Amino acid sequence: MKGKTNSAVWTILGILAVALGWEFAARSLGSELILPGPLPVARRFLTLLTDPRFPPAVGASLLRVIYGFLLALPAALLIGVPAGLDARARAFIRPLFSVISSTPVLSIILIALLWFGPDRVPVFTSFLMIFPVLTGNVMEGVRSTDPRLVEFAHAYRFSRKDLFAHLYLPSIMPYLLAGTRSSLALSWKVVVAAEVLSQPARALGTGMQAAKAQLETTELFAWTAAAVILAATTDVILSIIVKRRRAHGSLA
Amino acid sequence: MDLSLENIDFSYGEESLFSNFSFTVTLSGVHAVLGPSGCGKTTLLHLIAGLRQPSAGEIKNRPSVGYLFQEPRLLPWRTVTQNVEIPISQVFGENEARKRALRFLDLVGLSGKENAYPEKLSGGQRQRAAMARAFAYPAPLILLDEPFQSLDLPLRLQLMDLFKKLLIVEPRAAVIVTHDPREAIYLADRVAVLSGKPAQVVLDERITLSLTERAYSSSAAAELEATLFAALTPAFL
């Protein structure tokens, strides 16, 4: 308990240090147009909360993050399980994954703009970026499955369905949760970037782009703060889920 | 119909474990296979269970099997009851499987632990749960791969007695592999001694001792043990 309080104190000190550094830099520059200080940004953020554009923008961006994840998850299971089981399947998918993960995000966004409407570009881009991450985690989970348990399951003639439900899925679960955490963090960044370029009617990225176009730097920072807070909240919620599962001793 | 391995060849890479090996198991009584470490005892069970295929020869009348491994091999993310229930749920309906699982957990003395996860059980309790799982599985044959070896002697005797009790309540055939002649004498009706690489049966005896004569302190058992040990010794050298 003492260690916990201690680390909380240091976290608060860390936040204060960042805020102080930020305030110091803003004062030295002396221009709100280039770098507004933390207090004006905080005030603008609070007024943004009552802005009629804000709640729909948050909802729509959140939904895009969720849709991207919901598309990527089944695809990752579908590809990751066979790839985890069989070296040939791993070799087969490797080229595709290398191409996806070395393509610049902006290229994907620009290509997606040619193919889809503004609402779908962020979802598609986030799907494409997190799909390899999740698949990699599923693959690792399958490969980490205890071979002695696999042998037991074969001796007792488990059906494919039971093998998956009672053996592979629980083995994959911790890896999948870790993958979900890193995917969602990545997804927030990608979704907002794609929104800035594709300009859907309701979006955090659209708000940022509008603020930037009007040289409203403080507002741009306030929108950014919203994106950071949302991403951090998703991460905290997931980390609580991970901890709970561990505390219960059962991972599925 | 007897289970029979006929002229089996099997090797790991260059190392030949079985060459033209034949072995018959009647589907009644307890058959012990005694041999030094690494002579292919575990592989023999794998072949019988269908976990490995011989490169030549034939295995006839292979039944479905219950399997007790050296370690309990319980699913850590499922409760004790679910661990017994899951393998049999493919054979029985859901209710029937649950009832059967609970009955066998009761038989092995794990009443009260039904909803516990394996990590909350002692080593002996986990092996009991594995035993419940093996016996609950509706197979005419149970394979045992030295499941009592890692336990201390009192616990080992307890679990071997439990195994004998279960065989009376739920009769079926068993093949137990072990490197301990005493264990073979205590449990089996027949003992086959294997020599190593490639494996050959060097002695195949029926054990006709009474239950009391099989006890660890009995002199009749000591005599048989000496015979088995003599057959084993060349394999050790």
Image (tube, grey):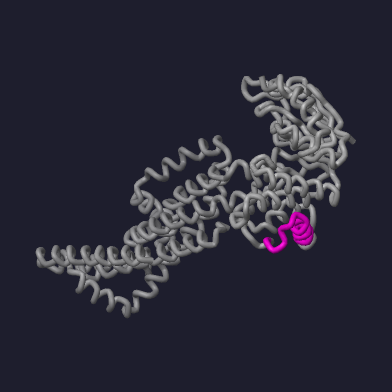
- The quarter in which the N terminus of chain A is drawn is bottom left
Is residue A152 positioned above or below B104 on the image?
above
**Does residue B38 appear anywhere in the picture?**
yes
Q: Nearer the viewer, residue A105 or B128?
A: B128
**Does residue B47 appear anywhere in the picture?**
no
> In the rendered image, which quarter is residue B61 located in?
top right
Residue B54: image location, x then y, percent: 73, 27
Indicate whether residue B137 is drawn in magenta: no
- The quarter in which the C terminus of chain A is drawn is bottom right
Q: Residue at x 71, y 31 (%)?
A: B41
Judge left or right: residue B15 versus residue B31: left
Residue B181: image location, x then y, percent: 75, 32
Indicate whether residue B110 is drawn in magenta: yes
Residue A96: image location, x then y, percent: 46, 41
Q: Residue at x 58, y 52 (%)?
A: A169
Magenta range: B98-113
Residue A141: image location, x then y, percent: 53, 47
Q: Residue at x 85, y 42 (%)?
A: B211
Most common SS among magenta residues: helix
Is residue B9 positioned above or below B95 on the image?
above
Q: Residue at x 34, y 47 (%)?
A: A104
